[in-house]
């Protein structure tokens, strides 16, 4: 299993998501470009407080064509969505402890883009979340949320 946020983790997530036919069937046709910004919050042992990890997801007709880390903030031009939030929240979602829809609705995650379209396709986020949390894909070398070792 790859360590969370490693290059191998991004590659494994891409393969896992593309292997799920139910995911592809529920994604609206077309291209979707999403920037994810994960901010170190002093709780996560994986991203120091005040630092960021950035990654980019490019989907075409229900398949992820690209999922990769970026060294700096991704320019907004051409993005459909930008999702920003605390590292401990993203990690808790990956561990199956928090619901991404709930965290978006309560404002914990900042989501910029066409919210009407996103809400019409909220089941997509739930599918991705279910695939990830049931996959046992991530190794947590510094401890899994709530970070007990």
Image: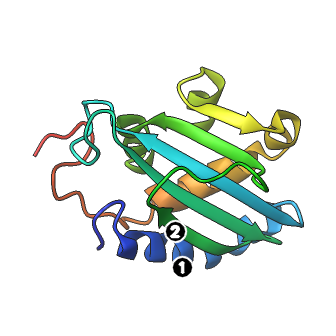
Residue 125 vertical placement versus 113 (above, below): below
CB-based contact (under 8 Å), mark 1 and mark 2 = no
Q: Is residue 106 above or below residue 47?
A: above
User: Where residue 49 appears, x then y in whole percent?
Assistant: 28, 33
Determine which of the numbered discs, if any, sits on residue 35 in the image: none
Q: Which quadrant holds residue 127?
A: bottom right
Q: Quadrant of residue 15?
A: bottom right
Residue 57, image x and y in percent? 63, 62
Circle nearer the N terminus (1, 2):
1
Residue at the image point whose x is 78% and y is 60% from the top: 32
Q: On the image, numbered disc 2 is attached to which residue?
A: 68
Q: Tell me where residue 128 appears, x and y as whole percent.
A: 60, 57
- Front residue of 59/76: it is 76
Total labels drawn = 2
Q: Nearer the viewer, residue 34 or 52?
A: 52
Residue at figure coordinates x 81%, y 34% from the top left: 115
Badge nearest the viewer, 1 or 2: 2
Q: Quadrant of residue 21?
A: bottom right
Left or right: residue 95 versus residue 59 is left
Q: What colouring does the structure picture have?
A: rainbow
Q: Gap in Å between the C-alphas at discs 1 and 2?
A: 12 Å
Q: Is residue 119 above or below residue 24?
A: above
Residue 69 in sight here:
yes
Seen at 56% across and 69% down, the residue is 67
- Which numbered marker is on residue 15? 1
Furthest residue to the top? 106
* Image spot of residue 60 (x, y percent): 79, 72
């Amino acid at each position: 299993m790859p360590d969370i946020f490693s290059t191998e983790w991004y590659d494994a997530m891409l393969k896992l998501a593309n292997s799920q036919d139910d995911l592809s069937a529920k994604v609206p046709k077309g291209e979707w470009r999403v920037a994810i910004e994960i901010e170190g919050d002093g709780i996560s042992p994986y991203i120091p407080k005040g630092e960021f990890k950035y990654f980019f997801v490019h989907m075409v007709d229900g398949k992820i064509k690209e999922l990769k880390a970026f060294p700096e903030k991704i320019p907004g031009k051409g993005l459909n969505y930008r999702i920003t939030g605390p590292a401990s929240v993203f990690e808790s979602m990956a561990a199956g402890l928090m619901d991404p829809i709930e965290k978006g609705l309560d404002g914990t995650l900042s989501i910029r883009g066409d919210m009407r379209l996103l809400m019409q396709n909220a089941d997509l986020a739930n599918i991705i979340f279910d695939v990830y949390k049931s996959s046992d894909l991530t190794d947590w070398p510094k401890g899994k949320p709530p970070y007990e070792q």
